[in-house]
Amino acid sequence: MNEKIRKAFDSVKAEEELKEKTLSRIAEARKHRPGLRGTRLIPMLACLALVILAGGLAWFSPSATISVDINPSLELWINRFDKVVQVVGWNDDGRELAAALDIKYMDYDRALEQIMNSEKVSSLLSGDGVMTLAVVGDNEAQCGRLLSGLRSCTAGQGNAYCYSASEEELEAAHILGLSFGKYKAYLELMELGFDISPQEANDMSMRDLRDIADSLSGETETDSSQAHIPGSGQGQGQGSGQGKGPAWASDGES
């Protein structure tokens, strides 16, 4: 009897040791199973994907616009890192210049330098050409930084004017098919009683628009509708506008 009881207890002890060894091996196997390790990596990979996606959206999404008008007229779309993510021409000259530039993903100030150094723009600036640069965006800190940078870039240009504008004004300009600088000049001429279409304003240089406005502002007896549109054959306008800043730049000219 005693021998049978001893063998029974030995059997139970052996089963417990086997169970412990089995559980130990299972635990060890779990550490090395690719499936389990992959399961733990899924949340980490998902978080990484979200970070990459968010960064990509921030990089390619414009948060501000710089409207450049002299004729050419074009826009630079700027992301939150102050890089150019898109260049859009708003008239034939603007589209031609935009196609010739290689400024995408460049810092906005370097991009502006390339624009000002381009053959056509530099020729206009070295003469009596008028350039306006408007900063548009909802982020006040970024727009303030961009405006300050534009003023630094154009500091040596006597006929370059930098100012800020609202998203609503830019949208109104786009509805008429105009860049922002041309839009403001168009509104000024309309307020002065001059009959001009958005398309006519879009095809003209900022200097020509400025000269018409100066001519209208100085008229006393002449009908304003007869002021001269360059190349149109209409009446002769007076005044070159030299030394006089455009009315639309009065809130922040450089």
Image (cartoon, grey):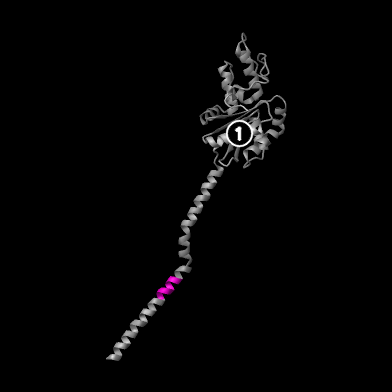
Q: Which residues are magenta?
A: 22-28
Q: Quadrant of the N terminus?
A: bottom left
Determine the residue located farthest toward the left in the rendered image: 1
> Going 41% across and 77% down the picture, which residue do you hit?
21
Residue 50 is inside the magenta segment: no
Please tell me how many numbered marks the rendered image carries. Answer: 1
- Residue 44, image x, y percentages: 48, 56
Q: Residue furthest top?
A: 221
Q: Is residue 1 above or below residue 126?
A: below
Q: Nearer the viewer, residue 167 or 82?
A: 82
Q: Is residue 22 left or right of residue 159?
A: left
Q: Position of residue 168 (x, y in %)?
A: 51, 29
Amino acid marked by disc 1:
Ser
Magenta-span inclusion, residue 24: yes
Residue 29 shown left or right of residue 97 in the figure: left
Image position of 74 with respect to 219: above or below: below
Asked which secondary structure carries label 1, the reply is: helix
Chief secondary structure of the magenta portion = helix
Pointer 1: what residue? 148
Instruction: Tell me residue 167's x, y (percent).
Output: 52, 31
In the picture, measured across the screen, residue 230 lies left or right of residue 165, that is right
Placement of 8 over or under 24, stated as above or below:
below
Near-viewer residue (81 or 224): 81
Figure quadrant of the C terminus: top right
Using the rendered view, name the quadrant where residue 98 is placed: top right
Q: Residues within 10 Å of mark 1 (few under 14, many from 20)?
A: some
